[in-house]
Image: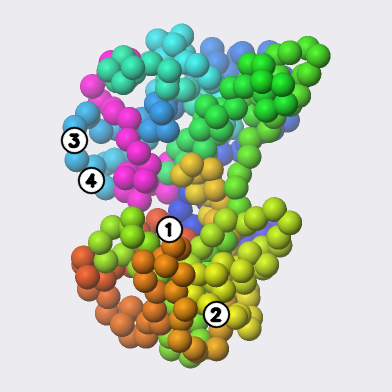
């Protein structure tokens, strides 16, 4: 059996608990029965925000925070209103279905879900959720975002309709009939070190004050992953890599990426920072990072990110 977790456990949002049961997506009778099944669990989204067990206006805290699942009776009015319904999968024979309420005004959507929950950005609450729930919510968010951006056919411009339990959209124009599949945009992210005690971290102007992170960028058409790693490092800081090794990956549906993590080695040399890509970048000593003050002068990336994981693993290797 493949060890999906790796020695330190899976990245957050990866290794979700659901059996995606893709062989059931074409079975419309079975899908209709799941929709009516009192055991089925529903999770609602509004404009890429997930429904969590937090009253409107309350500050998120890890203690007791979770996804707000609704059963068939609790979700009745949401099912009637939902713009899209997507079958996510099964856990212990119980189906999980995501409902999209994005077409409604915010007050209407919030009124439908009641006082026990509110729609929150997973980037805010994700690190505070139990990991299994965070991955299901990330999956739902990514898939419903894709639906929201593919309501018209990219071939002929006609409206598309959801099919296969929400895992495909089909053009409604019978002369076209094109099928559109959910997409994920690959991005590479890499910890560059010098083979000894230093690694490269940079920062972008738009990041929270003090935050420094690994280099990253989207894979372009016609590139391999290792091509993209080498190109991004050279573009951003002017270093030529001597070795690249794959580390792990992380679904990152903010809005639709998968982060492909690498550890790369380059000979120590002064950096040539590209001013349009980064506000700053520098070599940092391992000891500096181990003693990071985690304040507005210097902090490492958020704990749910693969960037943090890459840095942490490199620090522990030393
Ligand atoms: Zn079409």
Mark 2 to mark 4 CA distance (whole Å): 41 Å
Q: Is residue 62 magenta?
A: no
Disc 1/disc 4 C-alpha distance (Å): 19 Å
Q: Is residue 28 left or right of residue 36?
A: right
Q: Where residue 239 is drawn, which disc sits there?
A: 2
- The image shows residue 79 at horizontal and vertical percentages of 46, 13
What separation in Å lies between label 3 and label 1 (alpha carbons)?
A: 24 Å
173 w.r.t. 5: above or below = above
Name the image quarter holding the N terminus. bottom right
* Number of residue marks: 4
Q: CA distance from mark 2 to mark 3?
A: 46 Å
Residue matched to label 3: 58
Task: Name the N-terminal-most of marks 3 and 1.
Answer: 3
Query: Disc number at residue 294?
Result: none
Looking at the rendered structure, the secondary structure element under dot 1 is loop
Residue displayed at 76% across by 24% down: 178
Instruction: Judge by depth and name the residue closer to the eye, 235 or 268.
Output: 235
Q: Are marks 1 and 4 in contact (CB under 8 Å)?
A: no
Label 1, residues with CA under 10 Å away: few <14, some 14-19, many ≥20: some
> Is the residue under label 3 in contact with that under label 4 (CB below 8 Å)?
no
Report the mark closest to the observer, 1 or 4: 1
Q: Which residues are magenta?
A: 111-133
For label 4, the residue is 61
Q: Nearer the viewer, mark 2 or mark 3?
A: 2
Label whose residue precedes the other's in the sequence (1 or 4): 4
Q: Are circles 2 and 3 on residues that touch, CB within 8 Å?
A: no
Instruction: Answer yes or no: is residue 6 visible.
Output: no
């Amino acid at each position: 059996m493949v060890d999906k977790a790796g020695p330190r456990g899976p990245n957050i949002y990866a290794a979700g608990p659901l059996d995606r049961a893709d062989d059931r997506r074409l079975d419309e009778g079975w899908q209709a029965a799941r929709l009516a099944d009192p055991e089925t669990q529903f999770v609602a989204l509004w404009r890429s925000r997930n429904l969590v067990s937090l009253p409107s206006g309350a500050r998120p805290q890890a203690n007791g925070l979770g996804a707000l699942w609704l059963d068939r009776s609790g979700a009745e009015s949401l099912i009637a209103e939902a713009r899209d319904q997507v079958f996510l999968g099964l856990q212990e024979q119980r189906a999980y279905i995501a409902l999209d309420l994005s077409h409604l005004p915010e007050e209407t959507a919030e009124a439908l879900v009641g006082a026990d929950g509110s729609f929150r950005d997973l980037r805010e609450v994700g690190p505070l959720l139990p990991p299994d729930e965070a991955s299901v919510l990330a999956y739902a968010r990514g898939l419903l975002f894709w639906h929201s951006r593919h309501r018209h056919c990219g071939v002929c411009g006609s409206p598309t309709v959801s099919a296969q339990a929400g895992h495909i959209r089909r053009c409604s124009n019978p002369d076209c009939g094109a099928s559109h599949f959910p997409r994920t945009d690959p991005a590479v992210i890499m910890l560059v070190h010098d083979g000894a005690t230093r690694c490269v971290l940079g920062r972008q102007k738009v990041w929270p004050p003090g935050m420094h992170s690994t280099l990253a960028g989207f894979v372009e058409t016609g590139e391999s992953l290792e091509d993209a790693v080498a190109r991004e490092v050279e573009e951003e800081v002017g270093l030529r890599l001597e070795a690249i090794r794959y580390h792990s990956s992380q679904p990152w549906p903010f809005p639709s990426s998968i982060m492909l993590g690498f550890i790369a080695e380059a000979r120590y040399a002064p950096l040539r920072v590209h001013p349009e890509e980064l506000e700053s970048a520098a070599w940092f000593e391992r000891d500096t990072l181990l003693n990071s003050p985690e304040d507005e002068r210097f902090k490492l990336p958020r704990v749910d990110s693969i960037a943090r994981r890459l840095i942490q693993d490199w620090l522990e290797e030393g």
